[in-house]
Image (cartoon, rainbow, N blue to C red):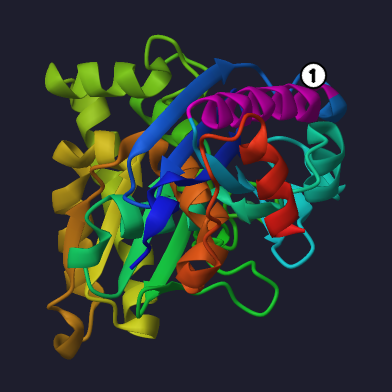
Amino acid sequence: MLTGNGDSVVGVGLEINVDYLSVCVLDLLDRVRYLRVVRIDNREGSVDAAVAAAAELTRAAVDQALADGLVPVGVCVGVPGTVEVDTGRLRYAPNLGWENLPLADMLAAQLQRAELPVRVGNEANLGALGELWGGQGQSWGDYFHVSGEIGVGGGLVVGGQLMLGVDGFAGEFGHVQIDRDGPACPCGSQGCLERFVGQEALLAAAGVDAEPATSIGAPDGGGVALLVARAQAGDPKTLAALDEAGRILGGACATVVHLFNPETVVLGGIFAALAPWILCPVEEEMHRQLSHGLRRVQVAVSTLGPDAAVRGAASEAMRPILADPASAPRYPRDVPGGLARRRADHIA
Ligand SMILES: [Zn+2]
């Protein structure tokens, strides 16, 4: 248990996604102290411009946190791609078209706050952690969190820990091949799950004429809001598309359950918004494919929504303090300028 001014410790989470940037300052009690979202199409601009905008958003959050007497202890950024978590290098983000970037170093250079360590993680993994620390994750036991936005990702939490794999790439659920003759995928393979249950595939199958967008990035909710409206109106083509997607997703989840025997499969991102129509087919197909002893797995729906990843990132930024509460800094608040100076001294 942290004492003293431990309640002022905060982590700064950042998310760089296809069509938005978001930043979140979270304290150790999982209270959101600051949250800002900027809609920006990161597919069209340069990488440098996106990183500069992300750094500016982060700097504003850190400045506000310090002005509020809070103590930022680190920054973690979530991206929709494979990340070397040890080095902070983004290997590949197919929906951004970004490849092989030293993202942690680039952000740290732009941010110019040497006292704040910058880490990078996969957004789906961070979304799964967001649920653990700020959502219902504590009640789910070991769980597999499936998140859909434009792509599809997964995060497996076992014993309260995220399973990262040897390179940190675990959970690339959207690129599990389900049809060797299926459509080509930006990852270089073909027939990936994402090509069948990702947003682009859902919109096409339902006959909705809209560009894929994240639920945060699209001002009016984008294509997912159109899907929900059509499903609510009983549109047969939309209902059939969602039912089929749910069955394909359920079958893929059955494979994960066979491998890891989790207690819960969690539907997050757009799958949470579409849960009224896909939850039953997911459950039915998953249970149909499961061996008898594995059928007690339950399907739950995320309650954090699209903020899960940036909240998970902010929590991850505090991980060193959570692992070693005694290292939480203590700062006198009555010394003008003392907060920033002493924070730097402590972390250095
Ligand atoms: Zn793929």
Residue sticking out furthest to the top? 220
Res 97 → quadrant: top right
User: Where does residue 325 sit, x and y in percent of width and height?
Assistant: 46, 69
Q: Residue at 48% across / 27% down in the picture?
A: 68
Q: Residue at 26% across / 47% down in the picture?
A: 302
User: Where does residue 250 sit, x and y in percent of width and height?
Assistant: 29, 60
Q: Residue at 24% across / 23% down in the picture?
A: 228
Q: Is residue 107 magenta?
A: no
Q: Is residue 272 left or right of residue 343?
A: left
Is disc 1 placed on a helix, strand or loop? Answer: loop
The answer to whether any part of residue 197 appears in the image is: no
User: Where does residue 281 sit, x and y in percent of width and height?
Assistant: 18, 52
Q: Residue at 70% across / 73% down in the picture?
A: 167
> Which region is colored magenta?
49-68
Q: Between 119 and 102, which is closer to the camera in this rendering?
A: 119
Label 1, ligand 1: CB separation under 8 Å = no
Q: Is residue 249 left or right of residue 274?
A: right
Q: Is residue 50 magenta?
A: yes
The kind of residue on which mark 1 rests is Gly
Q: Main secondary structure of the magenta part?
A: helix
User: Where does residue 208 sit, x and y in percent of width and height?
Assistant: 39, 18
Q: Which residue is mark 1?
A: 45
